[in-house]
Image (cartoon, rainbow, N blue to C red):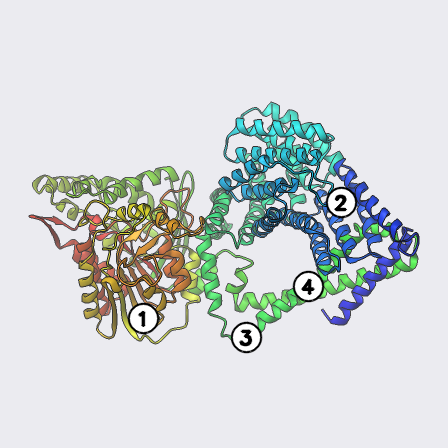
Amino acid sequence: MKLQSYFHVRFLMVGVALALAVQCNISSAKGNGRAAWKAQFMELGEQSKQAELAGDLDTAEKLARDRLNIAGDGPARAQAVASAGLGNVLRSKGLFAESEIMFRKALTLNEASDEPAGYTFQLRATINLASAIESQGRLAESNALFRKALALQLSSQPNHVDAIHARTLLANNLIALHQYSEAEVLLKQAIAVKPDFNNKEAGDQRSTPYWETMRKAQALNALGLLAFQQKKWTQALDYLQQAQSQFSAILPPQQINVLKNSYAQSKVYFKMDKPEMALAILRPLQGQTVAALGVNHPFNAKVELLLAQGLPDSEKAEKNRLFDHAMQVFERVQARDQVVDVSKFWSSYLQQTGQNEKALQVSLKGLDAADEVFSNSQGLSDSTREDIAQQFTPLYKNTLALLLQLHTAQPKAGYDRQALAVASRTQSRLFTEMLKRADVSNLQGDPTFNALKSKLQTQQKELASLQELQNEQIASAGRSNDTETSLSNDPIVAERMKAYRDKLVREIAEASRNLQTTEDSMWTRYPRFMELTKPRPVDLDLLQGKVLRPDETLVSYSLLNQKLVAFVIGQHTFKMIQSPVGKAALYALIQQVRQPEEDPKSDLSGLHKLDPSVLFKLYEAVFKPIEPELGNGRKVLVVGDGPLFTLPLEMLVTQWGADDQNRFNAVRTDKPDTLQEYATLHYLGDTRDFAYLPSLSSLVSLRLYSKPPVQYQTELVSFANPDFKADPSQASTREALGRAQRSLRGSSGLTIPPLPETEGEAREISGILGGKSELYLGDNAQEHTVKTIDLSHSRYVHFATHGLMGDETSMVSKELGARADSVAQPALLMSLGGNLQGEDGLLTMGEVLSSLNLNAQLAVLSACNTAAGNSDSDHAGEGFAGLTRAFMYAGAKGLLVSHWSVESQSTQDLMTSVFKQIKQGNDRLTALTNARAQLRAKPLVLGLRGVSQAHPYFWAPFVFVGD
């Protein structure tokens, strides 16, 4: 926007404000003097507040606008107070974007004032701004503001009534973020506050028993909402009824707090399977809400949504009308989380009534809104963001199931392609976002990218400035129809105002066109950058046209409640295949397979529990249906879902007929306790080579946005045989490290099993590769060294040590004063002896993300359980474990990671064999396949007996992740 245009707009706005002040014939400093002006200013404020409390929001808005008009002749402090007052009313009316503008304006004016209002004004304006932002679904931004407001309150007046309110509002925000423990603490603190009414600032009208009752009732109400989220229905109803009793004692029945409480009680009654009681509240509540707030208020839309869910199916037309209107309202006020809710329930109802096409349209709206909510959560902890992502998972899965139905009815309509796109949106969301940021960072040296980015940002700012002027005009002058009416008595002002509005509309349209042109260029040339703020799914055209190679097939799984969906993609082929195995059944089968591997017993007796029939069932459910689409090629790229991330497909058994069973049983009988019977089985790894990926988007990153190639200066950097002799003094540290004993060769007690053979492993690999190697062994295997040396020019990086799962690491991290939301991270255990240089010996996922810069062809995490994340099918949205994702983010092009605790000698043999194969010219995936075959043929001597390493426990845990 040109500077001249900007000042022209400002000049017009000032002129209009002055004209309005004259037209309204309100006393100013020139008329009845300063005292009269101040009295009228205060009176309008009090009248507006009382009208708002009484539920007469139209009158409250008119009075607030009158007050803002006369403030134009007063000091900046008065303008700030009047802006905040109007913001309050606009927020109560559900005009959240407009109210946000007024609160920001109030804070800016107050800061610029020669006599700024006190901390109380700043506190309340900050709280109200946070509430307006929260209502638009920007939870992370509002959380930071609520915390700022609470800190300000507690540092100034911890026993003020506002201390109750600040805690309650933050608690409500935390409930929305699923951080229930902190929310409960805050609410109980709020109720325990005993306000001091004797020591209050001049003009403080809230240090009264009335406001104490109001704020504590709101805290009780929030406790009811918290109990509801925790599915404690009786407790929720009790809290809500206590709150309503207090509200009713001081508020009229049409006041918003009373209405919201009734709504919450009706939700509880539905959950308690008492729909008649819920509807008895909801039906009259809708009329009361419309009368008090208007039909287009967001709260009325919430009432309509709940009513639509509760009405009997016989009222089909009314249900659809309510759903439709609620969607329109939430879209208008940009309440994205509410759009998701409407989509979820309306789509489900439409499917029940056979309206699948309409249901799909509604679902896709919800998915777009869910993506925006997740994108807006940046700044929150990873655990909180994962909770947010999990909250939306049912909508994604239901949309996918709907697309399957539509595809079955119309196989050539392209619903399978849409299903693939939907599936890609659910995969490893946090990690996908991290990879996109890393991809964009690689573009910083591209002058064309930098020029386009600068142009884009300039145009975005110009458009935002114009839109802010338009919104400010609307917020300050009222809705367009009211403005026309107010100006009609002065034709000169009306003409100027119309010319100003028309010019602003033209400038916004031109700025929007220019921005769209630049965005189109960025999408064409630098789509990864655009996806950071406007996420797009990975589509079939991209995969087939730019990503996949002729000698490979990509298989992406999506697990639904009742079926498993596989998308099989080649350069020129695509097929969606459904298997009739649901989430619970698949999870149970995989648990049966993993249990013997995770608990083999010291004498290996537990390994006999691995049942080939279960491995065959898994093959039939997961892989056999897609075999015809794969052809003869060995290489298969796999993106799993849920518990599939914890299963090495190589160990699945492809034949289990009568002959196979007889042969297996005969060897088990003839050679008991040797495990040689497992050498008779036909494994999927005999015919297929698998490369695993966290998401489709991660493959796009590896293939299209990889770092520029480097000149390798070091063949191998290895950290092996760390010194574990130093016993930590803290009891919790000893406990966590004691649980790290996962090798068969480990001892019992609280000491950590040493890994002396890993030193030989590192030396042998170094000798195989030749060239320059850097080996950090014993007490030289320091965490500080890992984080400070330059690894960016190392071809291979090797860690031979113990791994800790997140819960194990947390016990150590808490002793170090780590933040509560970041302690549960997986880690590699480095040396605890020697010069730690201030480190704790735990190389956590977060430290890998922040400290390591890799370009390694292969990173080997030769530790236990470094591959699989949470195997719970309900909580495996991020797929592979944090360490695997962290090393991929750091730049490793491929990784070898383990699915379960590893036998140390077998691991050494496998690793050295892999690097021998690589040295002979094999690619990394082929090298792993050949090394496995060699290990399976070699017996392992334990004591006086030998056992066959053909059992998957020995050769199957290590898998290749990456490209």
Residue at image point 59% right, 71% down:
454
- Residue 517 visible from this viewpoint: yes
Name the quadrant of the C terminus. Answer: bottom left
Where is mark 1, residue-wise? 794
On the image, the x and y values in percent for residue 293 come to 74, 38
On the image, the x and y values in percent for residue 33 come to 90, 53
Q: Nearer the viewer, residue 409 or 816?
A: 816
Labels 2, 1: front one: 2
Where is mark 3, residue-wise? 448
Q: Indicate which disc, 4 or 2, sits on the residue closer to the N terminus.
A: 2
Label pair 3/2, CB-CB below 8 angstroms:
no
Mark 1 Cα-neighbour bin, 10 Å: few <14, some 14–19, many ≥20: many
Mark 2 Cα-neighbour bin, 10 Å: few <14, some 14–19, many ≥20: few
Residue at image point 72% right, 31% down:
251
Residue at image point 83% right, 61% down:
14
Q: Indicate which disc, 4 or 1, sits on the residue closer to the N terminus.
A: 4
Q: Amino acid at mark 1?
A: Ser
Q: Image check: 329 left or right of 488? A: left
Judged from the image, the secondary structure of the residue bearing numbered disc 1 is: strand
Q: Indicate which disc, 3 or 2, sits on the residue closer to the N terminus.
A: 2
Judged from the image, the secondary structure of the residue bearing numbered disc 4 is: helix
Q: Indicate which disc, 4 or 3, sits on the residue closer to the N terminus.
A: 3
Residue 203: which numbered mark, if any?
Answer: 2
Q: Indicate which disc, 3 or 1, sits on the residue closer to the N terminus.
A: 3
Where is mark 4, residue-wise? 463
Q: Amino acid at mark 4?
A: Leu
